[in-house]
Image (tube, coloured by chain):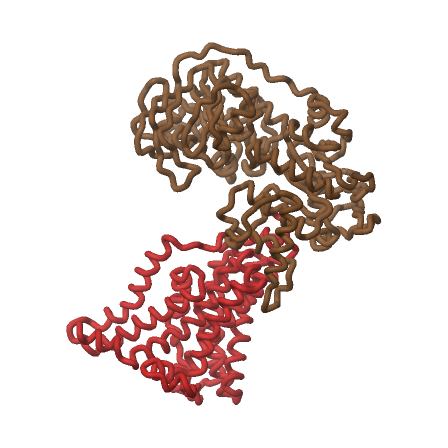
Amino acid sequence: MTDSTVLKLNGLSKQFGPVVANDDVSLTLNRGEVLALLGENGAGKTTLMNMLFGHYLPDSGTIEVADTAGQLQPLPLGHPQLALAAGVGMVHQHFTLAENISALDNITLGSEPLFSLRRNRRAARRRVEEIIAQSGLNAPLDTPVGRLSVGERQRVEILKALYRQARILVLDEPTAVLTPQEADTLFENIRMMTNDGLSVIFISHKLREVLAFSDRIAVLRHGRKVGEMATSEADETSIARMMVGAETPELASAAMTPGAPVLTMSDVSVAGRSKRDTLNGVNLTVHAHEILGIAGVSGNGQSGLADVISGLAHPEQGLIKVNEVEIDTLSPAAMVQAGVGRIPEDRHREGIVGAMSVAENMIIERLDDGGVQSRGLLRREAMQANAERLAQAYDVRGPGVNAPARLLSGGNIQKLILARVFDRAPQLILANQPTRGLDMGAAAEVGRRLLEARERGAGVVLVSEDLDEILGLADRIMVIRDGELHQTPGRDREQIGLMMAGEPA
Amino acid sequence: MMDILNILLSESFWAASLRIATPLIFGVLGALICERAGVLNLGIEGIFVVGAMCGWMAVWLGAGLWGGVLVAALAGAFFGLLHAILTVPLGLSQHVSGLGITLFATSVSYYTYRTALPNVSSPPRIEPFQPLDLPILSDLPFLGSVLFQQTALTWLALLLVAVVWYVMNRTALGVAIQAVGDNPDSVDAQGLSVYALRMGAVAVGSALMALGGAFLTMSAFDAFFFGMVNGRGWVCIALVIFASWRPGKALLGALLFGAFDALQVRLQTEIGALVPGQVFLMAPYILSIIALVIAARSADYPRALLTPWFKGQR
């Protein structure tokens, strides 16, 4: 590892309308170094990287990239093609892979002449295999990408960048979709590659992996760089403080004695269209004063479980009781009636109606309530007052309660949903990936509200792919895999990770 | 039953099937290229009309037959490009734009025809493509006389099936077109232009559609009539789903449709006294709907079909 600089960002600024996404950000990256870019959602990390990659044109500032001889050269801005050519590769959070063509085709796409009648597949394959051997990034090359696992797809993404001779690799939240074991393998591979001279910037929310795998940490807040330090000198509290600008309160979760069961599922099976919404003989009980955490790799039946609890699925068999009353016909309305509050996984699509106002979205689950309507007509003042009260209490910020809900940011949409759900004081709360994509402040708020509900006597089913979140909140943890629920013997991270990946515990 | 068997074994029946299938082969291949790139082109019906009119008129004005084919293809590409501009960089609804193109292209063709020939009751005729006598192939028993009766345009259609298959599956361009129809971001991230790929595919696909129309006036008949395209474009839109966006199956689908159509004409003369003629006319369409219902359930749609893509939005 040498100390020669391979990348310099000098005073980059970018404004979208009135919103300042980046303000005078400067960064340097050294050869063979892993730089972690930390920051809350909307802190400007992705915008910064998109400027580096030429997707956005900065309002001011310059970028310099080292050429093959190690000399820093100015990079023309706003040209992805030139960034690629200069050796900058980017792996986006949402994979940019075509699923109907093979991994090899995805890797070579765009690097061979389009209007040639013959392709030199053999040479391309040999090069890709060489890269695989050097980096340890294994993936089947001839299978259509649609049939690869998420981990394999991510490796194909990285191979794509390396095939383009990337010397600087940007990874946008690379572990968001991986099991802990897959994530560890990824970081091992990254280590192998940095030893060969590759430089890596990775964007992450997860403090644990940032501390474990980076050499240096840069923190962004509100579009500005607020701190930079060697990882060896950093600790969780100090980075978290830098990110949110204040001490993040520790979640107090004193043990509580579970009360009566609020949800019982006995031998519930759902034949879904795919693995993600299939359940096989699920048994679970959630008590009052209890948070049950459901850990698992995405697509293992979480959607099926959530659909049953929110009344959307139609189980082939099994018994479901809410508050010890059997529910014979599942429907979303029946579940809401029975006292279930839902925080859906896809908050944009299932949580709100984007075209309707914030105020309307806040009453959407209680339209039969005399408080907001009389004889079928909405009572607009009551609705308005209700919305203003909730917006205040749950800190929903945005262009006002009469603006369309889609104009809110992700975190504020989630606060809107929290307000709607918790205001009804439900006995059972289904929280499906409640903090996915939220910044630390908003995520902490979600956790606080869930604990508050538990205190009040509600039962909570917390479905999450973020093990840290489950370990931090849940009284009891189960693992979902292939549509089956397994009780975990303890709270051991390693063991739960292995169970998620399908190893015998 | 014997009658049907006799029909199915006759050379003329298969020759007719292939003839009827030819414009559909052009059309399905054209639609396939557009949709593989992620753009539904409902302008196909109108582009057929444009191809039929332009090809014929070019020849009538003195161009050679292949000159007419070229004019038809260019005219098709022009209307395809119009559709592409509206739906790709501007991202308008592909349904609305496509239907608009059909109305526009059809009207422009009729208008041009009427302006050029204001006072004729029957359209002037041209000397169309003649059956191609290929030395060895034509001497083959059965197959020889089926193929012997076909013109150069039918041969071109069959050749294009192979060309489109090769380009789609064996060249970098074809892979890029498949990728842009599945996930445009994948193409953009690798530095290729989503717009250029999609617009190019729509223009080329539309040129092929226009060849289907040109076949009608320059090979199947020798003049241009109003209403002569008669829904062939819509049939192609159905066939491309039946074909799961694969050139080989597209050929098969077009041939099946051609065979049904040829069969109904012959059945009509055989047992037309018992059943109203309209039933026979309906038969190919009903059968293609049934085939579509069966095939479409498992169809592997290009994932980005109908979805506009805008640079810098992800």
Q: Nearer the viewer, residue A147 or A207?
A: A147
Q: Which residue in the rendered view is the most extreme toward the right?
A: A71
Q: Is residue A208 rendered to the left or right of residue B32?
A: right
Q: Is residue A90 rendered to the left or right of residue B202?
A: right
Percent across and percent down for residue A392 are 58, 23
Q: Colour of chain B?
A: red
Q: Which residue in the rendered view is the most extreme toward the top?
A: A257
Q: Nearer the viewer, residue B268 or B54?
A: B268
Q: Is residue A136 rendered to the left or right of residue B42?
A: right
Q: Is residue A322 rendered to the left or right of residue A56?
A: left
Residue appearing at x 62%, y 51% in the figure: A129
Percent across and percent down for residue A254 are 55, 11
Work out whether B51 lies above or below A317: below
**Which chain is depicted brown?**
A
Q: Which residue in the rendered view is the most extreme toward the left?
A: B274
Work out whether A460 lies above or below B248: above
Q: Nearer the viewer, residue A118 or B304?
A: A118
Q: Is residue B110 visible?
A: no
Percent across and percent down for residue B199 are 57, 63
Work out whether B210 lies above or below A310: below
Work out whether B283 lies above or below B224: above
Percent across and percent down for residue A45 are 69, 38
